[in-house]
Image (spheres, grey):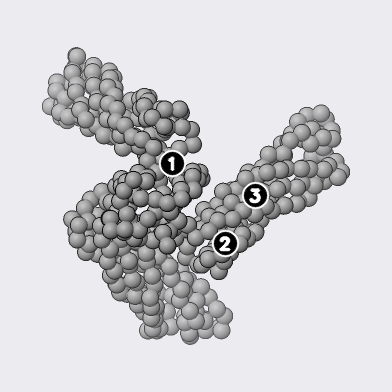
């Protein structure tokens, strides 16, 4: 069966060069410009019909020789704004921008006046998120997000609020959903978060006032096939807000929120090339697994008679791709629970940094990396009442992919899906 996947269908792409000129006054007289380097920062985009508006800042580092024959430095930020024409572009579509500095020219007009010309090249790609059945075949091995299921649930959240000032009238209540967290269990997704409300009301002095309120909520959505470890996306929509002023200081609120939940999992398979859809996908370059032993000795804050339990997780993973290798660094965060001499259970946390590398032939700088860490074993020994020896066996599964465009064969496209 050909899997239903969520993929980025390429709408169009284009490249534009922009000449950005500026004149800067140097902080001290110069006899020579040594060099100027530039990077692009703070990129923002807006998609309109047939075009993508791109704005940002060119951050420059100017190095010059002063009259004292010392090399001095001066930064400069120059804003730019342009557009790139892309047939088929429309509001709501996804945008990817790759900026590069093609040329930096400069002329020292006088000892303190520097004229610069920067040629900026912008490669812009517009894609549309769609769900479609991709046909398996003998083409490249790619990594895609398979759609396990999706569902919608409406939730009524009712709350009585005590106003800080007596009110004669409620003029408006605005509600937004924030701080969403999810937990996938078998065939269900638990969704938790906060509804942030802005209450506008007229007090007894006829002055309009404001009061903020946050209400926690918890609900679940049935998704057959969902299991722990899968990926979740939640799109909340506040559908309806109603309120009744029960007394000058008591307000009854009713908020209806709709939750659209999608569950996916990462899969890889060989696609069939051919007419269908031009997709931006991640082609699998290689993958490998390594195990490391992280050993540490911790001094406990108080004497212990017994270690009850140690739990650990991996945080702050960073990666760097070099030729045929991936360097992986991170922190093993441990929670240590132990029994003190007074027979009371205590807790102490510990962070242990780790660094290793995984060999993956074909890996090159600039490629994408996906790391799945698993704590396999935690061993410990109480060397003394305050000295704890720990050994953690950590397994790292590392996959390297390269973003490419492929014309793949598809069946039964499901149409656009926006987040």
Dot 2 or dot 1: first in sequence order is: 1
Q: Which residue is mark 2?
A: 223
Q: Tell me where residue 147 appears, x and y as whole percent.
A: 47, 57
Between 217 and 149, the one lying in front of the other is: 149
Between 60 and 126, the one lying in front of the other is: 126
View extreme (top): residue: 110
Asked if residue 30 can be seen in this view, the reply is yes
10 Å crowding of disc 3: few (<14), some (14-19), many (20+):
some
SS of the residue under disc 3: strand
Q: Residue at x 37, y 41 (%)?
A: 10
View extreme (right): residue: 247
Query: Badges 1 and 3: C-beta atoms under 8 Å apart?
Result: no
SS of the residue under disc 2: loop
* Separation of residues labelled 2 and 1 (CA atoms): 25 Å
10 Å crowding of disc 2: few (<14), some (14-19), many (20+):
many
In the picture, residue 169 is in which quadrant? top right
Seen in the picture, residue 171 relative to 137 is either above or below; the reply is above
Q: Residue at x 59, y 51 (%)?
A: 260
Relative to 221, 245 lies left or right: right
* Image quarter in which the N terminus is found: bottom left
Seen in the picture, residue 32 relative to 277 is either above or below; the reply is above
* Separation of residues labelled 1 and 3 (CA atoms): 24 Å
Dot 3 or dot 2: first in sequence order is: 2
Query: Badges 3 and 2: C-beta atoms under 8 Å apart?
Result: no
* Separation of residues labelled 3 and 2 (CA atoms): 15 Å
10 Å crowding of disc 1: few (<14), some (14-19), many (20+):
many
In the picture, residue 116 is in which quadrant? top left
Q: Residue 152 shows which numbered tag?
A: none
Q: Which residue is mark 1?
A: 128
Seen in the picture, residue 306 relative to 323 is either above or below; the reply is below
Q: Which residue is mark 3?
A: 258
Q: Residue at x 83, y 30 (%)?
A: 205
């Amino acid at each position: 069966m050909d899997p239903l996947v969520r993929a980025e269908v390429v709408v169009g792409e284009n490249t534009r060069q922009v000449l950005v000129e500026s004149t800067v006054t140097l902080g001290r007289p110069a006899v020579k410009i040594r060099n100027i380097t530039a990077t692009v920062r703070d990129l923002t985009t807006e998609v309109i019909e047939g075009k993508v508006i791109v704005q940002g800042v060119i951050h420059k580092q100017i190095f010059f020789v002063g009259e004292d024959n010392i090399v001095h430095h001066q930064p400069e930020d120059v804003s730019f704004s342009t557009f790139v024409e892309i047939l088929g572009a429309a509001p709501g579509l996804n945008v990817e921008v790759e900026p590069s500095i093609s040329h930096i020219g400069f002329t020292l007009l006088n000892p303190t006046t520097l004229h610069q010309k920067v040629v900026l090249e912008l490669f812009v790609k517009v894609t549309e998120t769609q769900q479609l059945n991709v046909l398996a075949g003998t083409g490249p091995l790619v990594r895609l997000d398979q759609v396990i299921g999706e569902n919608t649930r409406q939730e009524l959240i009712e709350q009585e609020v005590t106003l800080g000032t007596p009110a004669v009238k409620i003029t408006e209540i605005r509600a937004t959903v924030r701080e969403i967290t999810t937990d996938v269990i078998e065939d269900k997704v638990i969704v938790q978060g906060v509804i942030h409300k802005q209450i506008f009301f007229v007090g007894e002095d006829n002055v309009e006032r404001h009061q903020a309120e946050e209400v926690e909520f918890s609900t679940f959505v049935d998704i057959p096939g969902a299991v722990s470890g899968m990926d979740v996306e939640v799109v909340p929509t506040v559908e309806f807000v109603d309120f009744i002023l029960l007394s000058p200081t008591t307000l009854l609120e009713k908020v209806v929120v709709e939750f659209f939940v999608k569950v996916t999992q990462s899969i890889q398979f060989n696609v069939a090339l051919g007419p269908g859809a031009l997709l931006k996908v991640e082609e699998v370059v290689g993958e490998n697994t390594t195990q490391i032993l992280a050993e540490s000795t911790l001094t406990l804050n108080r004497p212990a008679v017994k270690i009850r339990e140690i739990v650990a997780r991996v945080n702050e993973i960073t990666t760097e791709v070099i030729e045929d290798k991936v360097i992986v660094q991170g922190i093993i965060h441990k929670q240590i629970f132990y029994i003190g001499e007074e027979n009371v259970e205590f807790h102490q946390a510990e962070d242990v940094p780790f660094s290793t590398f995984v060999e993956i032939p074909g890996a090159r700088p600039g490629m994408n990396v996906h790391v799945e860490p698993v704590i396999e074993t935690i061993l410990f020994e109480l060397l003394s009442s305050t000295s704890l020896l720990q050994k953690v066996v950590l397994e790292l599964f590392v996959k390297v992919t390269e973003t490419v465009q492929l014309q793949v064969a598809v069946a039964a496209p499901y149409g656009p899906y926006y987040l």
